[in-house]
Amino acid sequence: MKPIKPTLENLSADFGSTIMVKEFVYPYQNNYQYWHFHHEYELIYINSGPGKRYIGSHISYFSNGELILIGPRLPHYSFTEPFTPEQMKTSIQMKENFAGEAFFLLPEMTAMKQLFEKAKKGI
C-alpha cells in the first residue's frame, strides 16, 4: 500500500497578524478533512464532542475539554468526527515567530520554549 503524503495547507492571517482564531461547530463548513500540515503552530481546544485524532504517527481519541498543541510542519488530520453531532472546537494558529524574535530568549520563557519544542512532535 502506497503511503499518503500530507498536503501543505497555506494559512493566511489578516494583514499584519501573526495569530488566527477559528471556531468550528458541527456541521463544519469549509473545514475539509484531510491529512495536512502547515508552517504554523496550532492550539486546538475541544469544546464539545468526542472523536479520533491523528497526529504524525500517533492515533488516539479526544473528548470534551482537551487541549492539543501541534508544532509546525507536523502532519495531522482535521479534528472532526463526521457522524457525531454537537461537536465544537476552537483553533488558534500561530506563526513560528508570533511573539517576536526575543520572546523565547527571556529567562522567564525557558519552560515555554521547551513546550514549543516538544510541540513539534505534538502534545
Image (cartoon, helix red, strand yellow):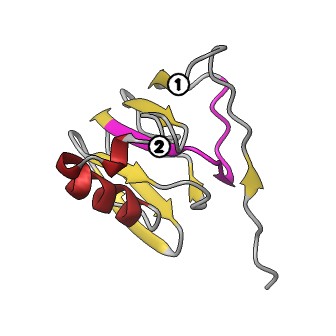
Residue 49 position in % (x across, y down): 31, 38
Q: Is residue 18 within the magenta segment?
A: no
Q: Is residue 15 above or below residue 123?
A: above
CA distance separating discs 2 and 1: 21 Å
Q: Amino acid at mark 2?
A: Glu
Q: Nearer the viewer, residue 15 or 12?
A: 15
Q: Which residue appears at 31% of the width and 38% of the height? A: 46
Q: Is residue 99 above or below residue 118?
A: above
- Is label 2 in a helix, a strand or a loop? strand
Residue 101 position in % (x across, y down): 48, 41
* Residue 119 lies in quadrant: bottom left
Image position of 65 (left or right of 90): left
Q: Which residue appears at 50% of the width and 35% of the height? A: 93
Q: Is residue 41 within the magenta segment?
A: yes
Which residue is labeled 1 in the image? 27
Q: Quadrant of the C terminus?
A: bottom left
Q: Quadrant of the N terminus?
A: bottom right
Mark 2 vs mark 1: give the one in front: 2
Residue 48 in view: no
**Quick one: label 2 or label 1, which is nearer the N terminus?**
1
Q: Nearer the viewer, residue 80 or 16?
A: 16
* Residue 52 lies in quadrant: bottom left
- Is label 1 in a helix, a strand or a loop? loop
Which residue is labeled 2 in the image? 42
Which contiguous range is marked in magenta?
Answer: 30-45
Q: Amino acid at mark 1?
A: Pro
Q: Which residue appears at 24% of the width and 45% of the height? A: 66
Residue 95 position in % (x across, y down): 55, 38
Q: Is residue 73 above or below residue 17?
A: below
Residue 56 in view: yes
